[in-house]
Every structure is written in structure tokens, then in C-alpha cells.
Amino acid sequence: MNWNDLLSKERLGGKIEIPYDQEKYSMSEFEKDYWRILDCSAFRRLQDKTQVFPLDKSDFVRTRLTHSLEVAALAKQLVAMVYKNIDTFTPSTIKERYPFTSENAQFAADIVACAGLLHDIGNPPFGHFGEDVLHSWFENNLNELTYHDKETDK
């Protein structure tokens, strides 16, 4: 396993213009991804969606935006904990064969933080119950659905 290949800094999209001195205040490509997600309208729309917690005793409303931020923070902390355990408990022979540096750990933490931010984008309302309803509807109605090409229907 080559961590440098797995944690590739190469991006498929266009280059992002950085409005500050990149030499003085450097950011990894993964940190830039995090900021791209925060600036994405699909992510910001999560503030308008309620995060459903069945049988919750509290009466305050939580949004999917808040939930996604919490998941991102938790995911990043878990990577830090895993790295600490790898560094502490892994035999040196394995560490030499599969080096996992502190820089790799930071990149991995940034990646899972991005995944935490993104994990609820595109999900239907009402969480897993909503997914079950959609699945059931398509299972019962997919055979009746047909595609009509406007050009051939004339």
C-alpha cells in the first residue's frame, strides 16, 4: 500500500485562485477541498433540512448542516486517534513496509472531514425511512414508467 498514491494531491477540476500568499499560509489540496465544500450551495442548503432523531427527548430542532459539521469533526478526530494508535502500537517492521507519516495522517483527516460534510447531500427527507419509501415506490412502479423522447414522439 503506497499512501502517497492513495492520498494523491492531483485534482481533476480547474485550479482554485488563492487570495493570499500561498508561501506564507500554505494549504493542502485536501484543505482546499474542505473550503470548496463549505462554499458549495448544495452544502449550505442543508441548513434548511431537519435532521430527524426519532424518540428524542429534547425539543430543539437540529439541521442536517449542523449534523454534517458534527460528523466531519468526529471523523477527523477518529483519524487522529487511529494514527496515534498506529504510531504507538504498530511494530517497526510493518511501519517501515507501510509508512504512514504524520503528513499522511493530516491528509487522511482532511479527506474524512470532507466526507463528513458531504455525506448527507442528496439524501431524501426523513432519513432512512424516506429512502425506504422511495425504494418501495420504485419497486412497485418502475415497470409502469416509460421514457418518451420528445423528438420521436412527434
Image (cartoon, rainbow, N blue to C red):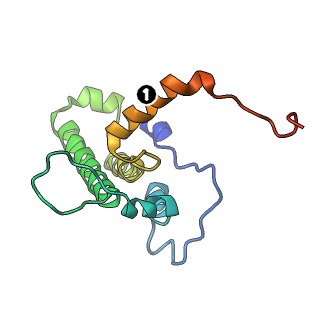
Residue sitting nearer the eye, 149 or 123: 149
Residue 147 appears in which quarter of the rendering? top right
Query: Which amino acid, mark 1?
Result: Ser
User: For numbered disc 1, what is the local secondary structure?
Assistant: helix
Q: Residue furthest right?
A: 154
Residue 152 appears in which quarter of the rendering? top right
Query: Label 1 belongs to which residue?
Result: 136
In this picture, residue 49 sits left or right of residue 89? right
Please tell me which residue is depicted at 59% across the width and 65% down the height of the picture: 16
Residue 46 to residue 115: above or below: below
Residue 64 appears in which quarter of the rendering? bottom left
Q: Position of residue 110 (x, y in %)?
A: 37, 53
In this picture, residue 91 sits left or right of residue 13? left
Q: Position of residue 44 (x, y in %)?
A: 44, 64
Q: Residues within 10 Å of mark 1 (few under 14, many from 20)?
A: few
Q: In the picture, which quadrant includes the N terminus?
A: top left
Please tell me which residue is depicted at 24% across the width and 43% down the height of the picture: 83
Residue sitting nearer the eye, 45 or 139: 139
Residue sitting nearer the eye, 130 or 51: 130
Residue 146 to residue 8: above or below: above
Q: Position of residue 129 (x, y in %)?
A: 33, 37
Please tell me which residue is depicted at 51% across the width and 72% down the height of the picture: 22
Residue 26 to residue 134: above or below: below
Q: In the picture, which quadrant includes the C terminus?
A: top right
Residue 90 to residue 54: above or below: above
